[in-house]
Amino acid sequence: MSENILAITGPTSGIGRATAMSLAEQFDRIVLLVRNLHKGEALKNDIEKKSAVHVDLIQCDLSDLSSIKKAANMMNEQYDSINHLVLNAGVVSLTRQETKDGFEMMMGTNYIGHFYLTHLLLPLVLNSEVKQIVVVSSNGYKFSPLTAPYFKRDKFNPVTSYGQSKLGTLYLMQALYDGYHKQGLKTTAVHPGAVSTNLGKTPKNERFGNLVYKALDPFFLSPDEGSLSTVLAVESPKKYNGKYMHNGGVLRIKKHGSDMEARTSLITATLDVLNLTHL
Ligand SMILES: NC(=O)c1ccc[n+]([C@@H]2O[C@H](COP(=O)([O-])OP(=O)(O)OC[C@H]3O[C@@H](n4cnc5c(N)ncnc54)[C@H](OP(=O)(O)O)[C@@H]3O)[C@@H](O)[C@H]2O)c1
């Protein structure tokens, strides 16, 4: 019988760390896809202290397509199947930054990076018994609809760009459901809630981020609380299949969040920019 494997992006902080710590002991192997190997090593040690799970560390910078490709190649060589793929990593940047490949940073990392990783790992997921992909999205998708040009806009608004990157992940979940549920793929997007994490506290905007977080901290969930939606999705793949979920309750998606024309246009543009023929 194949190993029961969960792979997760962004496990070195906040919600992803809490998710990995909480779920690890339910698996034979957990694959930590990290951009920072030192942080990954520390997490690996913490997980191994707590459970007997095998922990594999793979470097994957979602803001760099070549790094994603390298990580996926390693995974395709090392594993026959991945039962659950959790697309959790995320970045908030208050200033306009670009990924290595020239995409606006939030759209490029949160959406395009995960889209490309999903494309490369989908055969492994479909080859597993469970066949699940969980997307950590956000109610930030409500901030703005998405229109072309998607990836290289000159105008920058951090709230809009973050919201659009999370709307992209919601569309990704829906496209995966439509394209692959007949092959047994289960997909769920989750909203973790407002959670006290390192999100937005990158070196370039640390001061501002910290001020905002300090003011709002009493209202935020802890990372453990914020991981609940992802944990529930992983534990019940069929129950939340094709849904957008928060803490076990299915959320109604606003009109622009399920706009088929907008979704198709984004997916087509993404395939184009990544030089792919299908998701
Ligand atoms: N916090 C909230 O209130 C909230 C609300 C709704 C949705 N979310 C979503 O929840 C997810 C987790 O965020 P969080 O709040 O836990 O934030 P966080 O504490 O900042 O953790 C983000 C994780 O993503 C990783 N990451 C960032 N950029 C990356 C890149 N280029 N390549 C690979 N990994 C990268 C980080 O790695 P490092 O450790 O190396 O930085 C970290 O492990 C995100 O998708 C976010 O959009 C959060």
Image (cartoon, rainbow, N blue to C red):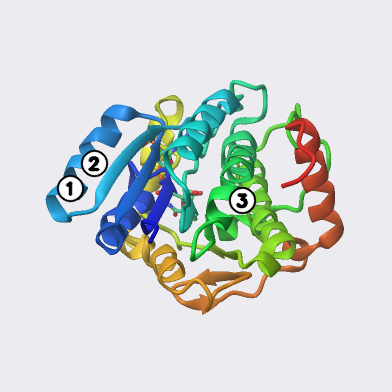
Q: Which tag is nearer the camera, tag 1 or tag 3?
A: 1
Would you call the spot at circle 1 few (<14 residues within 10 Å), some (14-19), or many (20 or more)? some
- Residue nearest the observer in this picture, 64 or 162: 64
On screen, residue 256 above or below 36: below
Q: Residue at x 46, y 58 (%)?
A: 83
The residues tagged by marks 2 and 1 sit, at their Cα atoms, a distance apart of 6 Å
- Amino acid at circle 3: Lys
On screen, residue 203 above or below 14: above
Q: Residue beneath label 3, please?
A: 166
Q: Residue at x 42, y 48 (%)?
A: 8
The residues tagged by marks 1 and 3 sit, at their Cα atoms, a distance apart of 32 Å
Q: Are marks 1 and 3 in contact (CB under 8 Å)?
A: no
**x, y percent for residue 150:** 77, 38
- Amino acid at circle 1: Glu
Would you call the spot at circle 2 few (<14 residues within 10 Å), some (14-19), or many (20 or more)? many
Side (left or right) of 102 relative to 29: right
Q: Which quarter shows the N terminus?
A: bottom left
Ligand 1, image quadrant it occupies: top left
Q: Are marks 2 and 1 in contact (CB under 8 Å)?
A: yes
Mark 3 CB in 8 Å range of ligand 1?
A: yes
Would you call the spot at circle 3 few (<14 residues within 10 Å), some (14-19), or many (20 or more)? many
